[in-house]
Amino acid sequence: MAVVQAPGFAGASERLGLAKSAVSRRIQDLEDRLGSRLLHRTTRRLSLTEAGTEFYQRSLKILSDLAEAEDVASKGASEAVGRLRVSGPMSFGVLCLAPVIGEFMRRHPRVNVELVLNDRFVDLVEDGFDMAIRIGNLKDSSLIARRIAPIRLAVCASPSYFSTHGTPSTPGDLREHSALLYSYAADRQIWQFQNTDPIEMRSSFKCNNGDALREAAISGCGLAYLPTFIIHGAVVAGKLDVCLTEYSREPSALYAVYPSTRNLPAKVRVFIDFLAEKFGEEPYWDRGIF
């Protein structure tokens, strides 16, 4: 790294307090150990090989992590510092995470948050995330998970839709209504409730995004069966009404997950604690619905 940044052996030797020949020999020893050339050497200049570029970039990250580790250790494990890279689902990230990030950063000004929102599954280690926010059943046993809050579903529609088509009083009544369906669901046509048989719904609209389904419901297109964190604002505003809440199935959960192959850094721990504080077992998005 010193040779690349100096750049050259002479500048590196001055920076490191070593003889130029010693720097050159150490680079040669490193290349011999790796079995790969890291630098192109000419009489005029040095340049990185492809392998050298990769090795240099990874070394930068390693030393950055080491500097962060020393910083944390010197100030105590309770102080959070560094970049926090978080993966989260799109709708929850926009509606629930983004509004509270400012408060978290004011509490922990030395943490830089990078929030990446995507509904696809990500590999935390391979994709370089410190942690992820996930909803539903967890399938990856290599991750450590902390439950943050319950996630409940509610059947909803616009007041005008209920006025025109009637309000279902039992799950069986749903067969007389048109549904707005989530196209990523495994059983796209099936709605599950407690103590009743599954209901196969008919539909003229499907979408892979819960926010779009909410907006379609507001416009009077039909019934939607959505997480309450997606519809809470519209219910409070009177744009949507809910029904059949006494039949809603057992809640799933919101989890914070992180790789089990590493200790929990302070920046991750304080962020998870913050989410539990803001949402918890009685999340704000259930108020006025259940």
Image (cartoon, helix red, strand yellow):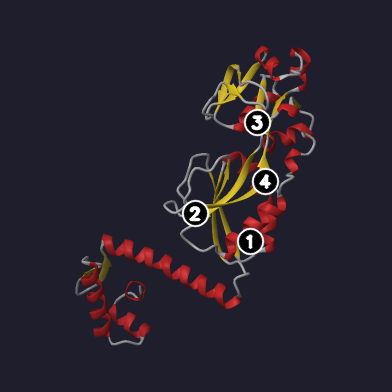
Question: On the image, numbered disc 4 is attached to which residue?
Answer: 149
Q: What element carries label 2?
A: loop
Badge 1 amino acid: Val
Viewed as shown, does residue 37 lie left or right of 233? left
Mark sitting on residue 226? 3
Mark nearer the N terminus (3 vs 2): 2
Quarter-of-image position of residue 237:
top right
| Disc 4 from disc 3: Cα separation | 16 Å
Query: Within 10 angstroms of label 4, few (less than 14), some, or many (20 or more) residues?
Result: many
Question: On the image, numbered disc 2 is attached to which residue?
Answer: 129
Viewed as shown, does residue 22 lie left or right of 82? left
| Disc 3 from disc 2: Cα separation | 28 Å
Viewed as shown, does residue 260 lie left or right of 160? left
Q: Which of marks 2 and 4 is in front?
A: 4
Question: On the image, numbered disc 1 is attached to which residue?
Answer: 270
Badge 2 amino acid: Phe
Q: Position of residue 136 (x, y in %)?
A: 58, 39
| Disc 1 from disc 3: Cα separation | 30 Å
Residue at 22% in and 75% down: 28
Quarter-of-image position of residue 26:
bottom left
Q: Is residue 151 placed above or below 208 in the rendered structure?
A: below
